Image: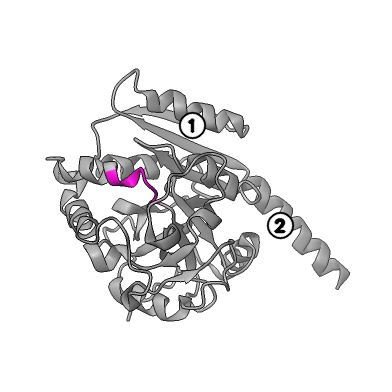
């Protein structure tokens, strides 16, 4: 027994020392500070890619300042055209490939993932059973009364955006599945929704033998995208002519929000709202039925 305890403690120590996170911070830094702080207890190595549109883009200084305040040095600055999500996917995959034999948390800068158990336990089970990636799905966050609140670095985002639900897919049909943890030998498709395998296949569809069992953990991806600043970004992406921007999804979302007079109905049953004011996997009681809905969208059931 004592030997097993020491082994588990050693594995936890090694996992935390080698756990990596990759993200891409683009034209907004509202949530970057909160996102990085959320993962610091479990992640040792942060790879923050800054996606700028020109050499003196203010986003470079803003994101760098936030990272350094938390003791993190940005990984790389990219100068690219606005809203090219295919390029963003290339950035994710290029970064992940730097350590193909290690584990990576994959998260946009407004995604705060919550697991059913300590992440190092999941990694240990994966190593023992040959599983190489973990799946999850989005839980959309909104402010009091269904409003889009203004968020600052001093905010407690869990309490200022306390309503957790599922409204992005019903309003815009945006994909709701997400790869949250994977071995660096694999890549991801655009939006990090599924694994991209070398033979051209993806993890969309039937249960995959390399996937950590969904019944043991389907990661909650709390999506804090929906603060006040998102309204302007929706307008900007909606007007983009770039095919890779997926502007049609953003147009649908913006039109729906405008129709709702910039306030979501917390009593709308389809949105499945509940109050969740802390990163507790069990607090969102509708997660099981929502998981089934998300898996259906991803072709699994």
- Give the main secondary structure of the magenta stretch: loop
Q: Which mark is residue 205?
A: none
Is residue 227 on the magenta stretch?
yes
Secondary element under disc 2, as helix, strand or loop, is helix
Location of the N terminus (image quadrant): bottom right
In the image as oriented, which residue stretches furthest toward the right?
Answer: 2
Q: Are marks 1 and 2 in contact (CB under 8 Å)?
A: no
Q: Residue at x 29, y 51 (%)?
A: 190
The image position of residue 150, as x and y in percent, is 43, 44
Q: Give whichever of discs 1 and 2 has the lower sequence position.
A: 2
Asked if residue 275 shows in the view, the reply is yes
Q: Is residue 153 above or below residue 197?
A: above
The image position of residue 267, as x and y in percent, is 36, 74
Residue 279 relative to residue 208: left or right? right
Q: Residue at x 54, y 39 (%)?
A: 153
Q: Which residues are magenta?
A: 225-231
Q: Which residue is mark 1?
A: 75
Q: Which residue is mark 2?
A: 12
Q: Quadrant of residue 239?
A: top left
């Amino acid at each position: 027994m004592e030997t097993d305890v020491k082994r588990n403690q050693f594995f936890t120590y090694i996992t935390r020392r080698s756990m990596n996170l990759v993200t891409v911070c683009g034209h907004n830094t509202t949530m970057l500070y909160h996102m990085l702080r959320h993962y610091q207890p479990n992640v040792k190595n942060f790879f923050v890619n800054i996606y700028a549109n020109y050499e003196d883009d203010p986003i470079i200084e803003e994101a760098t300042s936030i990272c350094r305040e938390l003791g993190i040095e940005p990984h790389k600055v990219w100068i690219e055209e606005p809203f090219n999500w295919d390029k963003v996917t290339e950035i994710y995959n290029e970064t992940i490939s730097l350590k193909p034999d290690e584990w990576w948390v994959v998260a946009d800068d407004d995604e705060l993932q919550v697991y059913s158990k300590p992440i190092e336990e999941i990694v240990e089970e994966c190593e023992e059973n040959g599983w190489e990636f973990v799946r999850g799905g989005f839980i959309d966050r909104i402010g009091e009364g269904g409003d889009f609140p203004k968020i600052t670095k001093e905010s407690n985002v869990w309490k200022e955006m306390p309503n957790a639900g599922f409204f992005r897919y019903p309003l815009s049909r945006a994909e709701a599945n997400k790869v949250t943890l994977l071995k660096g030998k694999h890549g991801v498709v655009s939006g990090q929704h599924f694994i991209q395998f070398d033979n051209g296949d993806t993890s969309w569809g039937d249960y995959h033998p390399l996937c950590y069992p969904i019944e043991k953990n389907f990661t909650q991806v709390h999506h804090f995208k929906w603060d006040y600043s998102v309204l302007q970004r929706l307008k900007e992406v909606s007007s983009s002519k770039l095919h890779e921007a997926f502007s049609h999804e953003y147009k649908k979302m913006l039109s729906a929000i405008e129709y709702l007079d910039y306030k979501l109905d917390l009593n709308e049953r389809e949105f499945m709202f509940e109050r969740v004011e802390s990163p507790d996997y069990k607090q969102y009681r509708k997660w099981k039925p929502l998981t089934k809905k998300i898996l259906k969208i991803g072709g699994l059931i």
